[in-house]
Structures are given as structure tokens and as C-alpha cells.
């Protein structure tokens, strides 16, 4: 009986190991995040809101002028969000939960794929592919607007505190390095 | 001693004996004279017989050698003969049932041929020398050769009937194979015509009254028709004349041969009998058909030529180039004797190697050769040489007729690849075709200001798109994949703000590399394009995203403008289409697009557009070669230049009704089509877009065979008389010229093909000498384009497609058609001249205009020979009057009765041997009744001879009757 239990345990352990190996294979290695603002200036809640306002306006414009090629805009927006997501203090600066940005990116990728299928299609305007594309785009835009209407979720306070500390530490280190590189001495009263 | 009473008794005895002797002598003398007279008459009769027989020989020889045509032998002529006395004895009447007279030759006939003969026939004199200076006439002969009443062109009525079918029910389904596809009810002769009630008698017994084996004689036919009251006694004479004029009851068949002539080739009988230049036609259906009902095995390459898997099929079996010398390799004069035409007496070929199948098709084999025997390079089209183009045409023919969708090519399609095994010709199969390739480089450049800085970012995607086209009914795109090999080099975006150092960002190509920078990509599945029949797929080969580039201050100035340059060189090299896992289409495109597009951006500006480059073919049936593809869009911007992609749409230059023709093109002809796209739709398609994938059912289908040049299929609406029969010399070989300019037509090919597997076919309509009523049947529109379906198991699934277009001819159609043939019958060197009859070109498409020609041509023949004939010969033994020394007798007074039965006399002067001594009774009238002769007619014979002229010129006498 004990032997049997031992065998089952060994097999279970092996399977567990395999699952772990497969999982680790399918999961891309996490990119190295940056601690500098992706916008080149301070990243704020306003940055996000401006982006969303512009994106909504662009989506509405594309909806009106759907025949015009526009899918590559979403490619750039997607890259923008990618850069944001790569910013370590995104949640801290924007006070928006990371999941919200991922959801935003999902919307952008949806619009990219939907519009791309339309823009690249050689089918007739009345074809199923193009008709469906337009319908999906319209529905997607409606959902996107509803998504924006809701307040974005805030990051957990504990995490914000941790990020705040990390950012302060980073900025301190960074300024020190800058001073060192420029040859300036430490100020008498350092802001941080 | 002497008794006075007994005196004189001796005298009496003597006298008695003397009287007896005299009586005996007189009797003997009388007997001798009688015998002598009988002998003389017998000798004269024999002489007349001999003269008649020698005349038969003379006429037969004349027909056979026919150096100046049969017309020279229509009647005897002799310019030195003055007297025409007795020639009206030519009048010959046959009595049907011993009562009803039927003229074989009517002296005073109004029939032109008869009248011409009776006006012009003269005696030929036969003389013998009696000394050095004097000849004596021993006899004279005259003949009249009667072509079947008005000059031939008859058809055997039995050949109009198909065994097992009822002629009265119009069973015809016209394909253009045999004469029975005509209906006897369409023969509208004045004195003999058939209705459903009477046509039934034409059928084989027991349905009709035709005996098994067909009608054997005119009398048999007349009897049968009279018994069935098809002919009444009141119109018997006229009906018989019509029947004789329209029908032949000889067992003559139509030889399935084509003929080559040349000044160097003797055409005398002695040569013709060796069949020089007469060659078996090419058997177009190509399969051995068992006539006992055994199923046709169309899958066996030994029994169906088109299923042969021979790597050099087109050279060996169509182009007559067994040694692959890129030109006709057979001398039609020295061709294997088995390929020369000779009657096989209906023997079923053992397999497809039987020479009766023909050696090939000279029209295709010598495609590009003119009447000067020189191959003209202009006919190579887009191919490297003319030989490859003619192989392409032949391959198209093969692939039309074989069952598979694997193209005929110089390289086995299974070995085709995109790098080394590039075919030189590829037959058209019933598959989609490669039609267009396009590169699309979509890009967006976005520059903006943010927090006092200027940024530019960009992205670009390069796609390659492929388009296939379906021009045939019944195809779907789902089974198709396309592999493309292309090269892309130096693909990059160079971007930067003014006065800043530009950044270079290279595209990374995601296609499968072959040999850098060469890549391969596969297309499919397909989506339907904007235009019907067009299917497309696109693949992304590279995506490049350039993150924001911040403008750097330069000399205290922040740049707010910059430049981006997108550049690359793409070569669309070769493409290969597989359909249902069979490599079926190949395109050697080799189109290079070199791009270097510069865009200026200003801060706050977004530029989004797509750069298009496309290469398209025009006629997708001919898309193999570089020259078949055009760069239609080159470096144009979709939005800025308002240029739309053509993928999924009709190609810019792909309008069959208005194709682009280069002004320098020496062969600019093209098919007449009403559609504006080659793509198939349920309501329209190219009229010639048809691949049977089975043996041809009709010669019409030859018109669907693509000619290896855009928008050209074999043109059956034009005949080239110069290339019909006159041989050319290719190097030292005799051959026939082949196809050339589209505008000069390809109808000559119709002379070189046959639709039956035998050397001879049942009788056909002779276009060179025909009867108008038979043309009524030949061109009966109802039969030709009727809606009857053909049920021919195993031959094809889509036979309905050749059953007519339903085009309605203009009302004078039949008269116009007949007038053309009648007017031009002397010009019918060969049957294919029928194609020049523009009245047959009915309809608005190429296929429609060829339909009537294609469905009529194989029911016709064209020859000037008399097929069968009757020859009437008059022969007289003559006792010539005159002196042996040649001096003339001053005059002989000859008595005669005039028209009022009054005895008259007339002097015949200058009477001598060696001439017929005659005088006209009055005036200058040349009537035989107006001549008196001094010479004595010892005996006269009148012969009527019937015979036939075979296609090789040989004459066969079938009957000789002595009428007098």
C-alpha cells in the first residue's frame, strides 16, 4: 500500500514538473521594465485621459470614414500602450490599475485587427467580411465608450506605497548619477 | 442409128446440167454474197464494238490522268470534224417498268449540262492508212460523260439514317461527325420530299423499308418509295430526276484524307495511285471505339490517345516531330506508307498506334511556317521560339482532351519547382489560373509635439497579395494554393528630423528564405474578390514599428519637419498554382519593383497611406512567360494618387472585348467576345472558356483551343487558301504550311482532322459540286442548335455545352449560305473553305460564330472528281467513199426526204477518203438532222457505261450495257 502511494506520488510529482515546464515555455520572459516616463515628460492621469480622448475622437472619425485606411494608427497606439505598460510607475503616476491599461490595449488591438481585416480585404464593400468588420467596429466603439465612462480601477494602496518608495529611490539615484556625470556637487538642500 | 426423136437430148441434158450447175453456182454465189455481207456486217459490228471499247479506255484514262480537269472529258471534241450527223442518237431513255420513260440523256434538254454536251459533242474519226498518202476512215466514235445529272454532290440516302433511330422523329443531335446528323425531312426538293409520314420509310427495316446494308440501287429505292406512295406515278419522271440528282446508291465512301500538292509532285494517276501526298487525317477524338457496343475504355492510354503518358507527347503525336528537332520532322511525301491514305474497309483500329489515327496535325506542326517554307519569328509570341509556342498550342489541345488536370509540359508538372525546373510550355487545364500579384506597403508616419518636444514615430507593413481567376464553369477556389518565389532586398525606412541624423530601420522578412534575399511564400485559402471569378489572398511578409524619435535641437532651433524614405527592391519571380494537390499552372513573371518613396512630415501631421506595386496578366490562359505579365501599378500611393488595388478585381488590361494591342504587334487579332472580364460568372463567361477533359465531340471544339497568345483561340472563321494544299519545302522535306496570323485563320486545320476512326466515312456533301437541297439539310438550324441532349456515356459529362447557343440567324440565312457555296463552288479546293462563308458567322461571340462551321464541316467534303458517272458512247463502222489514189470524186448526188416528206437531192462534192464527206441540207444549222453524208455507216453501237472515280483518281467501271 505504501509502495503504491509512493508510486502515485512520484507520478504526480512528475506530471507537476511537466506542467511547470510547459507553462514556463509558453510564458514569454517578462521584459525589463523602464523607470523613465514613456512620454519623455511627467506621466500623469491627464496623459491617459488625453490619450483616451484623442483615441475616441480618432475612432469616431474612422467610424465615419470607414473606407479610408486607418488600421496602422492602432498599431502605433498599441505600441504606445506597450511602452506605458513597460513603465514601472504607470500605476503610481496615473493612479489607474494596470488591468485597466491591459483592457485598453485589448480594445486597441481589437480595433487594429478589425480595421486591418477591412483595409486589407479585396472583397466587395457588400461582402460578409467587410460588413462584419464594420459591425464589429461599431459595436467595439460602443463598448469602448462604456469602458471609458466607468472610473478606472485604482491600484491597491499597498502597491502604490511600494511604487512610491521605489520611484523616490530611483529618482534619488538618478539625480545623483546625473550630478556625478555633470560634475556638480551635492546641493545643500536636496529636494529629495 | 440415130433416132430423130432422140436428137437434141444431149443438148437438153447439157442444158439441164448447165442449168443445174448455174443454179448451184447462183445458190453458191448467193450464199457467198450473203456470207460476205454477213461477214462484212459482223466485221463492221465488231469494229464498232472495238471502237466503243477503246473509247471507254480513252475516257477512263483521261479521267484518271486528268491533267486539265474532268471538264476536258465531258464530251468528245474534234475541231477537224465537220459532220455531226447521227449524234442525236445519244438520246437515251430508260423505261421504268417497261412503260415510263426516264431520260438518261435528253438531246433537246434544257438542262444546262446536257444542252452544252448536245450542242458541242463531235465525232472522233478513226482512220487507217491505205498507202503513204491516203487514209481511209474505218469508223467514228463520240461520247458524252454524264456526271450524276447536274454534276455530282449526291449523298447516299441510307447514310442519312442512323440504325435504331426513327428519322421521322428527328433524332439528330448535331455534333458534326456523320451524315446521319442531317435529317431527310430538311431536303426540300421540288419533286421528292419527306414528311414525318413518309420519312419513316427511309428507316431501316422493319421500322422503315431500307434493307439491311442500305439501298443497293436506284431501282430498289424507286420501287420502295413508289410502293409506299412516297412517289406517285404522275410525278415519277420528275421525282426520279430529283432522286438521281440528290442521291447516289453507290457504296462510295468519303475518304478521310488531306492532300498535299506541289509542282514537283506529279499528280498523274500513276503517281496518285501510290497515294503520294494523300495522308490519313488526324483522328480528333483519339480513342478506339468498339462498334459492337463494347464500352469505350477512355482511361487506357493504348486505347485513348489522349491518355498516353509520353513525355514528348505533343512532338510525337501532334507536331509530327518524332526526333524533337523543333520543326516538322516528317516528309509528307516520304511518310511511312501506312500513314498514306488507303481504305481500311472499316477495320477497327487495334490501338492508338494504328496509322489510321493519323501522324499528327500539319497545321499545328508547321505553325509559323509560311508559304515560302520559312519559319517566321513573329509567331513566337511571348515564347523563346516558335517551336515552344506551337508546343503550347498542341499542349492546350492535349489537355482539353485528356481527363486529368495535370498540364502537358516539357517538364513533368510533378517536378516543376520555382527555382530550377521551369517549364517552357504548360497546357491549359480546367483549373483556376494565376492572374495577379501585388505588393502593398501600408505605412503611417505620425509626428507630434509633447511637452515642448517634437516626436515622430512610424510603422509599416509589407504584404504580398496573390490573385487567381476562375474562367471555367464548375470550379471552386478552395482547392487552390499558390507558391510564389520573390526577392526583396534593402528594405528599410530611413527617417529623421531635419538637421538631425536620420535613423535607418530595416524590415525583417518573415517568409521562408530560399537563398537570401530570395523567399518563398504560399497563398490560400482564398476570398472572393470584388469581381466575380477573382479570388485573392494576402500575406504579410514584414512589419516594422519605429518608436518615437525625438527631435534634437540644432543651433537653438527645434526642427519641426523631417523626412522618411521607404525603399526596397522586390522581384516577383515565379509562381506555381496547385489545384487539388496537382501542379496545374506556372508563371515565370520576373517583375522588378524598385521603390524609394520620400515623405516629408511636419509636426502634428499624420501620413497614412499604402504604396502599391502590381503585376498582372491579361489573358490568364496564357500566363507562362515574362511577356505575358504587365506591371500595372508601380510605386503609386493608394490614397494620395487615388489608385486602388486591383486585387480581387478585373485586371486593368484584361478586357477580352477590348484588349490592349501593341501597335508594333504583327499579329494583332483576337477573339470576338462580349464579356469584359475573363472571370466566369453564372451569367457570362468567355465563349471559348471550355475544357472538356474528355475527347472532343465536335470539330467545333477546336475553336476553344488557346493559340498561345493573349485572346487568341484557333480561328475557325477564316480559311487560308494559299496554305490549303500546296506543299512547302522545310529544308529538303515536303510539308504543308501551318498556322500563322490570327486574321488569316486556322480553318485549314479542319481539312486535317476527322471525327471517325476509319479511313473512310459514309458519303458526305460535296461542297465543290453540291445540290442546294442537300445544303438545306446540312444547315438546318433546328438540328444544329437544337436542345436535344446527347447521351454518350463515358465521353463527357458536359456535352450539353456543345449543343448550341440558340442564336437566331437572320431570315435570309439559308439562302445566303447556299448562294455563297454555289457561287464559290469552283474555289473549294478543300472543304475548309466553308469557313469563309461569312453568313455562317452568326452570333456575337467567337464560339457562336464558329459553331455552324464546326458542326457542318465534317459532314462535307470538296473534290472536283466525278464521284460516279454515266458514259454514253456512240461508235460507228464507216465505209469511207473515195478513190484509193486520193483524188476526189467530183460529186455524189444524194437523195433525202425533207421535213415535208418530199424527196430531195443534194450534191456532195469533193468526195474523198480520209474525211467524212458531208453537206448540210440547208443553211448553217449544226443539228445532226441537217447533215447528209456520202459515206456508208456499216454498223453502229451504243454503249452506256456506269462507273465511279475513287479519291486516288482511279476509275472503276461498275456496269457496261449495250443499248444498240
Image (spheres, coloured by chain):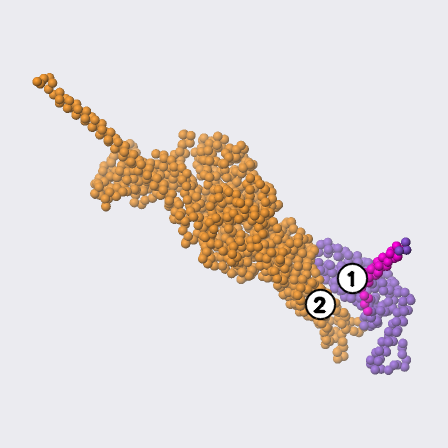
Chain colours: A purple, B orange
Picture residue at 46% right of the left edge, 56% below the top? B733
Q: Is residue A55 left or right of residue B674?
A: right
Task: Give the distance between the C-alpha atoms of the residues marked 1 and 2, in whole angstroms.
Answer: 22 Å
Q: Nearer the viewer, residue B699 or A126?
A: B699
Callout 2: chain:
B
Picture residue at 67% right of the left edge, 67% below the top? B516
Picture residue at 74% right of the left edge, 64% below the top? A72
Can the viewer see residue B694 in this picture?
Answer: yes
- Helix, strand or loop for the magenta stretch, by majority: helix
Q: Nearer the viewer, residue B349 or B126?
A: B349
Which residue position holds label 2?
B507
The correct choice, above or below, for B81 with respect to B444 in the image is above
Decide: marks 1, 2 in contact (CB < 8 A)?
no
Secondary structure under badge 2?
Answer: loop
Residue density around tag 1, few if under 14, some if 14–19, many if 20 or more, within 10 Å = some
Q: Which mark is residue A109?
A: 1
Q: Is residue B477 left or right of residue B667?
A: right
Counting from the top left corner in percent of width and height, residue B901 is at 28, 32
Counting from the top left corner in percent of width and height, residue B783 is at 55, 42
Picture residue at 51% right of the left edge, 55% below the top? B321
Q: Is residue A164 left or right of residue B414?
A: right
Q: Which mark's residue is nearer the viewer, 1 or 2?
A: 2
Span highlighted in magenta in the image: A4-32
Callout 1: chain:
A
Counting from the top left corner in percent of width and height, residue A172 is at 87, 76
The correct choice, above or below, for B224 with respect to B781 in the image is above
Amino acid at each position: 500500500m505504501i509502495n503504491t502511494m509512493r508510486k502515485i506520488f512520484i507520478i504526480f510529482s512528475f506530471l507537476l514538473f511537466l506542467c511547470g515546464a510547459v507553462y514556463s515555455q509558453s510564458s514569454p520572459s517578462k521584459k525589463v521594465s523602464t523607470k523613465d516616463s514613456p512620454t519623455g515628460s511627467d506621466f500623469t492621469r491627464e496623459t491617459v485621459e488625453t490619450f483616451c480622448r484623442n483615441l475616441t475622437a480618432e475612432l469616431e472619425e474612422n467610424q465615419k470614414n470607414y473606407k479610408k485606411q486607418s488600421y496602422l494608427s492602432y498599431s502605433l497606439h498599441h505600441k504606445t500602450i506597450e511602452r506605458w505598460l513597460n513603465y514601472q510607475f504607470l500605476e503610481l503616476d496615473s493612479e489607474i490599475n494596470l488591468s485597466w491599461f491591459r483592457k485598453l490595449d485589448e480594445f486597441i488591438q481589437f480595433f487594429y485587427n478589425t480595421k486591418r481585416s477591412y483595409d486589407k480585404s479585396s472583397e466587395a464593400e457588400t461582402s460578409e467580411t467587410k460588413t462584419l468588420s464594420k459591425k464589429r467596429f461599431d459595436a467595439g466603439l460602443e463598448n469602448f465608450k462604456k469602458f471609458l465612462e466607468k472610473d478606472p480601477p485604482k491600484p491597491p494602496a499597498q502597491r502604490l506605497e511600494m511604487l512610491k518608495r521605489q520611484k523616490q529611490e530611483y529618482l534619488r539615484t538618478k539625480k545623483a548619477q546625473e550630478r556625478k556625470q555633470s560634475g556638480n556637487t551635492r546641493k545643500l538642500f536636496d529636494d529629495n | 442409128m440415130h433416132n430423130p426423136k432422140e436428137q437434141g437430148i444431149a443438148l437438153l441434158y447439157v442444158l439441164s446440167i448447165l442449168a443445174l450447175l448455174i443454179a448451184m453456182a447462183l445458190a453458191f454465189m448467193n450464199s457467198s454474197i450473203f456470207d460476205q455481207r454477213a461477214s462484212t456486217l459482223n466485221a463492221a459490228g465488231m469494229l464498232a464494238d472495238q471502237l466503243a471499247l477503246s473509247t471507254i479506255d480513252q475516257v477512263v484514262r483521261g479521267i484518271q490522268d486528268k491533267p486539265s480537269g474532268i471538264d476536258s472529258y465531258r464530251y468528245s471534241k474534234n475541231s477537224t470534224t465537220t459532220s455531226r450527223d447521227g449524234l442525236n442518237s445519244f438520246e437515251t431513255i430508260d423505261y421504268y417498268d417497261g412503260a415510263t420513260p426516264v431520260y438518261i440523256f435528253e438531246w433537246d434538254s434544257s438542262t444546262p449540262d446536257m444542252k452544252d454536251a448536245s450542242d458541242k459533242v463531235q465525232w472522233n474519226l478513226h482512220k487507217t492508212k491505205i498507202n503513204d498518202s491516203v487514209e481511209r476512215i474505218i469508223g467514228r466514235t463520240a461520247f458524252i460523260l454524264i456526271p450524276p445529272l447536274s454534276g455530282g454532290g449526291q449523298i447516299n440516302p441510307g447514310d442519312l439514317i442512323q440504325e435504331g433511330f426513327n428519322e421521322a422523329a428527328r433524332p439528330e443531335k448535331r455534333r458534326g461527325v456523320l451524315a446521319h446528323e442531317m435529317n431527310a425531312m430538311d431536303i426540300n426538293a421540288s419533286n421528292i420530299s419527306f414528311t414525318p409520314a413518309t420519312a419513316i420509310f427511309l428507316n431501316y427495316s422493319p421500322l422503315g423499308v431500307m434493307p439491311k446494308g442500305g439501298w443497293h440501287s436506284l431501282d430498289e429505292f424507286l420501287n420502295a418509295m413508289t410502293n409506299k406512295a412516297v412517289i406517285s406515278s404522275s410525278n415519277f419522271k420528275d421525282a426520279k430526276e430529283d432522286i438521281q440528282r440528290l442521291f447516289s446508291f453507290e457504296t462510295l465512301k468519303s475518304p478521310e484524307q488531306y492532300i498535299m500538292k506541289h509542282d514537283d509532285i506529279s499528280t498523274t494517276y500513276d503517281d496518285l495511285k501510290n497515294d503520294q501526298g494523300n495522308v490519313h487525317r488526324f483522328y480528333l477524338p483519339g480513342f478506339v471505339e468498339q462498334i459492337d457496343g463494347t464500352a469505350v475504355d477512355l482511361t487506357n492510354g493504348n486505347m485513348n490517345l489522349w491518355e498516353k503518358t509520353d513525355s514528348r507527347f505533343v512532338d510525337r503525336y501532334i507536331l509530327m516531330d518524332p526526333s524533337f528537332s523543333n520543326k516538322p520532322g516528317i516528309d509528307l511525301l516520304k511518310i511511312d506508307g501506312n500513314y498514306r491514305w488507303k481504305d481500311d474497309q472499316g477495320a477497327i483500329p487495334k490501338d492508338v498506334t494504328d496509322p489510321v489515327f493519323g501522324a499528327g496535325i500539319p497545321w499545328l506542326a508547321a505553325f509559323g511556317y509560311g508559304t515560302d517554307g520559312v519559319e517566321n519569328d513573329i509567331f513566337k509570341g511571348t515564347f523563346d521560339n516558335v517551336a515552344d509556342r506551337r508546343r503550347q498550342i498542341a499542349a492546350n489541345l492535349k489537355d482539353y482532351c485528356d481527363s486529368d488536370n495535370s498540364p502537358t509540359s516539357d517538364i513533368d508538372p510533378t517536378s516543376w519547382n520555382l527555382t530550377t525546373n521551369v517549364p517552357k510550355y504548360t497546357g491549359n487545364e480546367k483549373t483556376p489560373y494565376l492572374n495577379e500579384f501585388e505588393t502593398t506597403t501600408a505605412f503611417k508616419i505620425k509626428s507630434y509635439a509633447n511637452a515642448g518636444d517634437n516626436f515622430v514615430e512610424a510603422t509599416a507593413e509589407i504584404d504580398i497579395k496573390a490573385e487567381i481567376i476562375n474562367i471555367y464553369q464548375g470550379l471552386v477556389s478552395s482547392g487552390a494554393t499558390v507558391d510564389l518565389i520573390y526577392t526583396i532586398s534593402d528594405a528599410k525606412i530611413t527617417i529623421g528630423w531635419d538637421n538631425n541624423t536620420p535613423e535607418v530601420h530595416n524590415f525583417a522578412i518573415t517568409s521562408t528564405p530560399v537563398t537570401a534575399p530570395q523567399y518563398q511564400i504560399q497563398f490560400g485559402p482564398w476570398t472572393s474578390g470584388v469581381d466575380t471569378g477573382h479570388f485573392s489572398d494576402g500575406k504579410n511578409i514584414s512589419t516594422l514599428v519605429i518608436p518615437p524619435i525625438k527631435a534634437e535641437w540644432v543651433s537653438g532651433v527645434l526642427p519641426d519637419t523631417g523626412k522618411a524614405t521607404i525603399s526596397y527592391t522586390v522581384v516577383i519571380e515565379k509562381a506555381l498554382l496547385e489545384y487539388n494537390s496537382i501542379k496545374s499552372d506556372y508563371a515565370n513573371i520576373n517583375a522588378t519593383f524598385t521603390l524609394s518613396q520620400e515623405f516629408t512630415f511636419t509636426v502634428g501631421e499624420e501620413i497614412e497611406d499604402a504604396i502599391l506595386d502590381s503585376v498582372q496578366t491579361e489573358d490568364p490562359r496564357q500566363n507562362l512567360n515574362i511577356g505575358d505579365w504587365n506591371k500595372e501599378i508601380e510605386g503609386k500611393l493608394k490614397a494620395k494618387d487615388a489608385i486602388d488595388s486591383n486585387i480581387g478585381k478585373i485586371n486593368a488590361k484584361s478586357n477580352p472585348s477590348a484588349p490592349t494591342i501593341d501597335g508594333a504587334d504583327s499579329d494583332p487579332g483576337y477573339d470576338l467576345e462580349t464579356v469584359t472580364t475573363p472571370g466566369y460568372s453564372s451569367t457570362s463567361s468567355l465563349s471559348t472558356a471550355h475544357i472538356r477533359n474528355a475527347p472532343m465531340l465536335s470539330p467545333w471544339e477546336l475553336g476553344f483551343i488557346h493559340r498561345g497568345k493573349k485572346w487568341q483561340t484557333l480561328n475557325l472563321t477564316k480559311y487560308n487558301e494559299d496554305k490549303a494544299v500546296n506543299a512547302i519545302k522545310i529544308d529538303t522535306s515536303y510539308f504543308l504550311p501551318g498556322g500563322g496570323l490570327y486574321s488569316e485563320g486556322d480553318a485549314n486545320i479542319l481539312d486535317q482532322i476527322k471525327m471517325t476512326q476509319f479511313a473512310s466515312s459514309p458519303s458526305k456533301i460535296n461542297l465543290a459540286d453540291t445540290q442546294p437541297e442537300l445544303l438545306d439539310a446540312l444547315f438546318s438550324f433546328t438540328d444544329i442548335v437544337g436542345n436535344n441532349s446527347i447521351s454518350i456515356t463515358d465521353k463527357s459529362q458536359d456535352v450539353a455545352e456543345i449543343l448550341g447557343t440558340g442564336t437566331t440567324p437572320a431570315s435570309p440565312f439559308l439562302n445566303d449560305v447556299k448562294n455563297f457555296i454555289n457561287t464559290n463552288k469552283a474555289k473549294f479546293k478543300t472543304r475548309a473553305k466553308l469557313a469563309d462563308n461569312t453568313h455562317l458567322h452568326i452570333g456575337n461571340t467567337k464560339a457562336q460564330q464558329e459553331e455552324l462551321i464546326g458542326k457542318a464541316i465534317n459532314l462535307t467534303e470538296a473534290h472536283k472528281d466525278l464521284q460516279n458517272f454515266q458514259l454514253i458512247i456512240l461508235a460507228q463502222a464507216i465505209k469511207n467513199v473515195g478513190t484509193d489514189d486520193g483524188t476526189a470524186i467530183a460529186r455524189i448526188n444524194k437523195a433525202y426526204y425533207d421535213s415535208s416528206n418530199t424527196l430531195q437531192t443534194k450534191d456532195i462534192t469533193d468526195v474523198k477518203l480520209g474525211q467524212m464527206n458531208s453537206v448540210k441540207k440547208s443553211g448553217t444549222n449544226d443539228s445532226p438532222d441537217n447533215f447528209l453524208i456520202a459515206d456508208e455507216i456499216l454498223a453502229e453501237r451504243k454503249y452506256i457505261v456506269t462507273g465511279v472515280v475513287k479519291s486516288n483518281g482511279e476509275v472503276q467501271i461498275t456496269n457496261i450495257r449495250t443499248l444498240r
